[in-house]
Image (tube, helix red, strand yellow):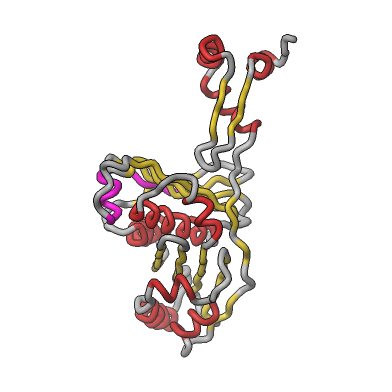
Amino acid sequence: MASRDQFQRFIFEHSQVRGAWVQLGDSFCQITGQAPYPASVRQLLGESLVASVLLSSTLKFQGTVSLQAAGEGALSTLMSECSHDRYIRGLARFDEHAVSGDSLHELLGQGRMAITITPDQGQRYQGVVPRESDTLAGCLEEYFERSEQLATSLFLFANEGSAAGLLLQRLPGHTEEDDDLWNRVNHLARTVKPEELLNLDSETLLHRLFNEETVRLFDAEPVAFRCSCSRERTLAALEGIGKEECYSILDEQGSINMDCQFCHANYRFDRNDIDHLFTGHTLH
């Protein structure tokens, strides 16, 4: 049985073709345990979490990459995020009475999808993900082709208790030999079965798929659920709401209570907290 909650990069030696592999177990269950997700929503959320980890393999700096979708169907919001050090979080908002289909289009309907890259230092970047494919993997492959000019193949699977994925990418500067290799490994990767990706360890899986190629597998990295919410970030959100609105809530309710959407942590702020936020002074 494979170790859960791990991420690994790999390369095909002496080529411009690289890959990444991830399996999620406990972290996936912690995230999906936050709400009573229907099976189809849980599966799509799992695929998006896997995708965010695989996308994080392309980061060349400290920060986060997130995948966000807003739809007009039964699934109104889908969001997953992974940091450079492989901490993940995610959520989905849905109308339980309207969930009927399983595909991306059936769940989201018309809507928008984007990838947001947020460096710890520097400017945030957001790219729009095309919605022409009816699978999340297909949409992301099209994004890389159009926005990054990188040939990319993604394989994303999730079931009730785990999620897993595989990414293959052909880098710039590829040769004719790299093109031949790319065609071969893609043909082989398309034979992967969901149960193989969900249950086999990386070495066994990659050997089974690419045993005639020379693959170098880098050290495994742990993946874990961790929410980045904090009292300070929540105060910053209140500052964004504005002084007038905050005092209006205080007058009506006596305090401001905010719950994190990702981990359900509760933050309570009284009048002293809000006075200090907007004036730098507290009244006792």
In the image, what residue occupies the spot 59% across and 17% down?
255
On screen, residue 82 versus residue 157, left or right, reads right
In the image, what residue occupies the spot 42% across and 82% down?
181
In this view, 273 is above or below 81: above
Residue 133 image offset from top left, x and y in percent: 28, 58
In the image, what residue occupies the spot 55% across and 59% down?
26
Residue 71 image offset from top left, x and y in percent: 31, 42
In this view, 131 is above or below 281: below
Q: Is residue 103 magenta?
A: yes
Question: Which residue is the extreme one toward the right?
Answer: 284
In this view, 269 is above or below 124: above
Asked whether residue 126 is in view, the answer is no
In this view, 83 is above or below 251: below
In the image, what residue occupies the spot 48% across and 87% down?
213
Residue 63 image offset from top left, x and y in percent: 60, 49
Q: Quadrant of residue 260?
A: top right
Q: Which of 33 and 239 is in front in this view?
A: 33
State how many labels appear.
Answer: 0
Q: Nearer the viewer, residue 246 or 250?
A: 250
Q: Quadrant of the C terminus?
A: top right
Residue 42 image offset from top left, x and y in percent: 40, 53
Q: Which of 124 and 110 is in front in this view?
A: 110
Looking at the rendering, the stretch of residues picked out in magenta corresponds to 102-115
On screen, residue 197 versus residue 14, left or right, reads left
Q: Does the magenta stretch include residue 171?
A: no
Q: Which of 107 and 59 is in front in this view?
A: 107
On screen, residue 88 versus residue 282, left or right, reads left
